């Protein structure tokens, strides 16, 4: 098939991946009718390219064999989400799998209280857990490190960038501050003092010219500074919770995990490697591991295998449909015989 035709197939498939990962099925009033607007604003801000494809191309270009990628996630508080939630860790683990598949070394960063949860989720995704030194050069492994919530966060950010010299920074479901410097949950409540200050990593990375990818679902996550006006307009309490932190590529989705899965599906087509997208069985393993380590459903605060109020069956069904898009997009020249 000619290159132009292949590119057309890829673009059509990625547009449908975006459509699938932005289907709204949230239960909270403050999220209803929001994601479609945020996604449209992000597409416009990024030149009209399907966002799953933009994320996939960034990974393909910036993940370098033998080099490190830093991936941060983590949302919670000591009372309601003491070990974090089920949206974020699975997506981060899938992104780490992609980095590993491309030959890079993924390093996962989260709050100290969420380290065990994120490590268990990564194991559920099929990644080994090692020290950073052993993960470097060991295929299909990652390391999980604590990110500071204290006054030393800016210093730690510089140390992490100097130590790992990453080629790419990724944030998924990681809350960032608004222009006034305060950070808020999706409902507009101020975050707890234990929130890791990942924004310092991205601020310094931008100063150093490091490319960045942000994935989120409510406008308060790192990356949405790219479309802050849209967050203010379309998200309830958006003028309070909208983050100032911008990333080079922003991927809004119905759930943050879904944004990562959409990127994986687009990359699977782009690289012609369908196994880059994990399976529904993998999804179940990750979510069960995540909940077993204390994570909760972010919509209800309950220790159940759901994501933002959506059932496990919905997560598995999403993976089945993404897998079908990938499979059919990779079939070339098919014509039915009737």
Image (cartoon, rainbow, N blue to C red):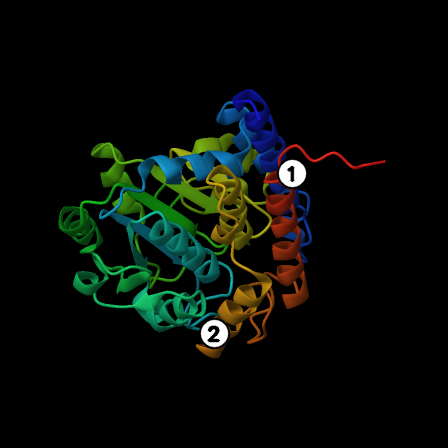
Q: Which residue carries the number 2 mark?
A: 289
x then y, percent, for residue 287: 52, 69
Residue 213 lies, with reference to residue 147, above or below; the image says above
| Residue drawn at x 59%, y 75% as measured from the top left | 304
Q: What is the CA distance from the residue labelled 2 to the residue labelled 1?
A: 30 Å
The quarter of the image holding the N terminus is: top right
Q: Residues within 10 Å of mark 2 (few under 14, many from 20)?
A: many
Q: Which comes sooner in the sequence, label 2 or label 1?
A: 1
Q: Of residues 4 and 265, which is closer to you in this image?
A: 4
Left or right of 184 on screen, residue 131:
left
| Residue drawn at x 55%, y 29% as measured from the top left | 43
| Residue drawn at x 45%, y 39% as measured from the top left | 56
x then y, percent, for residue 116: 35, 73
Instruction: Provide the secondary structure element on which disc 1 rests.
Output: helix
Q: Kindly tell me whether residue 224 is visible in this rendering.
A: no
Q: Which residue carries the number 1 mark?
A: 16
Q: Furthest residue to the front? A: 337
Nearest to the eye among marks 2 and 1: give it: 1
x then y, percent, for residue 196: 32, 58
Badges 2 and 1: C-beta atoms under 8 Å apart? Answer: no
Q: Residues within 10 Å of mark 1 (few under 14, many from 20)?
A: some
């Amino acid at each position: 098939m000619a290159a132009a035709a292949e590119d057309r197939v890829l673009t059509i498939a990625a547009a449908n991946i975006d459509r699938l990962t932005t289907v709204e099925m949230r239960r909270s009033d403050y999220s209803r009718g929001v994601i479609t607007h945020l996604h449209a604003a992000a597409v416009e801000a990024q030149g009209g390219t399907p966002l799953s494809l933009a994320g996939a191309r960034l990974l393909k270009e910036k993940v370098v064999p033998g080099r490190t990628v830093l991936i941060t996630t983590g949302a919670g508080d000591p009372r309601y989400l003491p070990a974090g939630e089920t949206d974020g860790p699975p997506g981060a683990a899938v992104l780490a799998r992609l980095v590993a598949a491309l030959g890079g070394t993924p390093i996962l960063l989260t709050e100290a209280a969420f380290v065990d949860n994120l490590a268990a989720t990564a194991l559920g995704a099929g990644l080994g857990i090692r020290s950073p030194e052993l993960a470097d050069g060991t295929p299909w492994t990652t390391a999980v490190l604590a990110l500071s919530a204290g006054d030393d966060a800016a210093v730690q950010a510089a140390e992490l960038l100097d130590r790992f010299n990453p080629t790419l920074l990724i944030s998924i479901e990681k809350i960032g501050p608004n222009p006034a410097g305060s950070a808020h949950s999706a409902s507009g409540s101020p975050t707890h003092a234990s929130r890791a200050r990942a924004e310092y990593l991205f601020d310094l990375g931008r100063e150093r010219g490091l490319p960045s990818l942000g994935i989120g679902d409510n406008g308060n996550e790192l990356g949405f500074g790219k479309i802050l006006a849209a967050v203010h307009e379309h998200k309830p309490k958006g003028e309070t919770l909208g983050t100032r932190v911008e990333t080079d590529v922003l991927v809004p989705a119905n759930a943050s995990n879904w944004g990562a899965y959409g990127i994986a599906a687009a990359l699977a087509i782009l690289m012609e490697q369908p196994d880059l997208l994990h399976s529904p069985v993998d999804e179940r393993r990750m979510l069960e591991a995540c909940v077993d380590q204390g994570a909760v459903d972010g919509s209800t605060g309950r220790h159940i295998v759901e994501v933002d109020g959506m059932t496990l069956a919905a997560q598995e069904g999403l993976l089945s449909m993404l897998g079908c898009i990938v499979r059919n997009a990779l079939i070339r020249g098919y014509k039915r015989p009737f």
